[in-house]
Image (tube, rainbow, N blue to C red):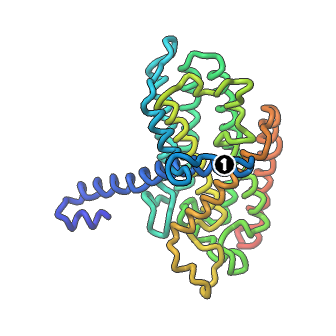
């Protein structure tokens, strides 16, 4: 894209700047539209599982319901509690929303469709996503209210606990692929299963950690059954209890952007990203753009997120922490040892 703007007569510096801004908008704007539509999909899945209709009035099939809700929230008054720390109170939802968007800079939508193709893409995502806890803690503390503060403490402990397991799971994938670059990880999965299946999920050593990654993603994004930060009977509405109008909406947008990110990472790390499911030339699906395959996989995993939310009861907090520290952490460490040992024997690393 930089070359295109240079051909229009721009200097290299201005061409690079404009191309970068365009690349950011090409990711951020569709992502915001996608968040609105997956909220609609979320509600439709819950309704179908509970034998209800779900949104079906605003627009055809209720497709404009999310936009109507967004307009309603936008027109509401922003209320800041008199005892709150006003500066931090306003910054917290902005921080949460911004951090949720930053990680998408290194997500590859195709062989060349990535904003920043860096060699440490996974480390970048891990570093940026860990900053999300600050927005949650600041919002709970700045509200100067008991229940948001309790929720913020729960959320920070929960996110930190499951990030440890996610980190070791990522180490297993990096060991097998031999790179932190997300694009190279996808390419390493081509024909991984008997030369036919694209993806690491077919690998008996990596399949268990894929399951752990998916469950840890539920906990990391505070989704059911790990939504202890928003336990209505205990904490009213969680760390965003005192928020209203667009401040409240930014938390929701950030939450769903993080959910989509986790769905995208599951697709990229274990299901071949933009690659078709099977590596067979006889099937004409190689003509389908890679971004379509990636979006279909993201939608599948988001459906799984919604399915779990509609069917699985909420854990107790002690069960949540026990699963993270006493089950997933030892298991993920075990698989790091097993996979590294297997690779040393198989590849002759000595």
Q: Secondary structure at mark 1?
A: loop
Crowding near pointer 1: few (<14 within 10 Å), some, many (20+)? few
* In the displayed structure image, the side of residue 21 where residue 91 appears, left or right: right
Work out whether residue 286 or residue 125 is closer to the camera in this orientation and state it: 286
Residue at 47% over, 20% down: 79
**Residue 209 shown left or right of residue 300 in the figure:** right
Q: Residue at x 55, y 79 (%)?
A: 286
Q: Which residue is mark 1?
A: 53
Quarter residue 122 falls in: bottom right
Which residue sits at x=78%, y=32%?
Answer: 317
Residue 342: give x, y in percent of width and height: 77, 66
Relative height, residue 35 to residue 70 (above, below): below
The image shows residue 85 at horizontal and vertical percentages of 49, 17
Left or right: 108, with 267 as reference point: left
Query: Which quarter of the image is occupied by the N terminus?
Result: bottom left
Q: Is residue 44 above or below residue 157?
A: below
Kindly identify the residue that appears in the image at 42 percent across and 51 percent down. 29
């Amino acid at each position: 894209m930089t070359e295109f703007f240079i051909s229009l007569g721009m200097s290299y510096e201005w061409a690079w700047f404009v191309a970068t801004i365009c690349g950011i908008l090409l990711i951020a704007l569709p992502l915001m539209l996608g968040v609105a539509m997956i909220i609609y999909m979320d509600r439709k899945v819950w309704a179908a599982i509970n034998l209800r209709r779900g949104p079906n009035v605003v627009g055809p099939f209720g497709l404009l319901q999310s936009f109507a809700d967004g307009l309603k929230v936008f027109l509401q008054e922003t209320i800041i509690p008199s005892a709150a720390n006003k500066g931090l109170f306003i910054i917290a939802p902005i921080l949460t929303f911004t951090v949720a968007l930053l990680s998408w800079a290194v997500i590859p939508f195709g062989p060349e469709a990535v904003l920043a193709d860096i060699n440490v893409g996974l480390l970048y995502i891990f570093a940026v996503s860990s900053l999300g806890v600050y927005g949650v803690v600041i919002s709970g503390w700045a509200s100067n209210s008991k229940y948001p503060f309790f929720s913020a403490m729960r959320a920070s402990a929960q996110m930190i606990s499951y990030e440890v397991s996610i980190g070791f799971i990522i180490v297993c994938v990096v060991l097998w692929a031999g790179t932190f670059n997300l694009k190279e990880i996808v390419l390493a999965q081509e024909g991984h299963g008997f030369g036919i299946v694209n993806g690491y999920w077919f690998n008996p050593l990596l399949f268990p950690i894929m399951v752990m990654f998916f469950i840890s993603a539920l906990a990391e994004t505070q989704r059911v059954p790990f939504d202890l930060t928003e336990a209505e009977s205990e904490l009213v509405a969680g760390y965003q209890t005192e928020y209203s109008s667009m401040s409240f909406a930014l938390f929701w947008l950030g939450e769903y952007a993080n959910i989509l990110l986790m769905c995208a990472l599951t697709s990229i790390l274990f299901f071949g990203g933009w690659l078709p499911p099977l590596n067979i030339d006889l099937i004409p699906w190689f003509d389908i753009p890679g971004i379509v395959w990636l979006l279909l996989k993201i939608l599948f995993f988001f459906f799984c997120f919604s399915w779990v939310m509609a069917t699985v009861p909420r854990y107790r907090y002690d069960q949540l922490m026990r699963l993270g520290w006493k089950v997933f952490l030892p298991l993920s460490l075990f698989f790091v040892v097993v996979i590294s040992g297997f690779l040393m024997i198989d590849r002759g690393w000595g």
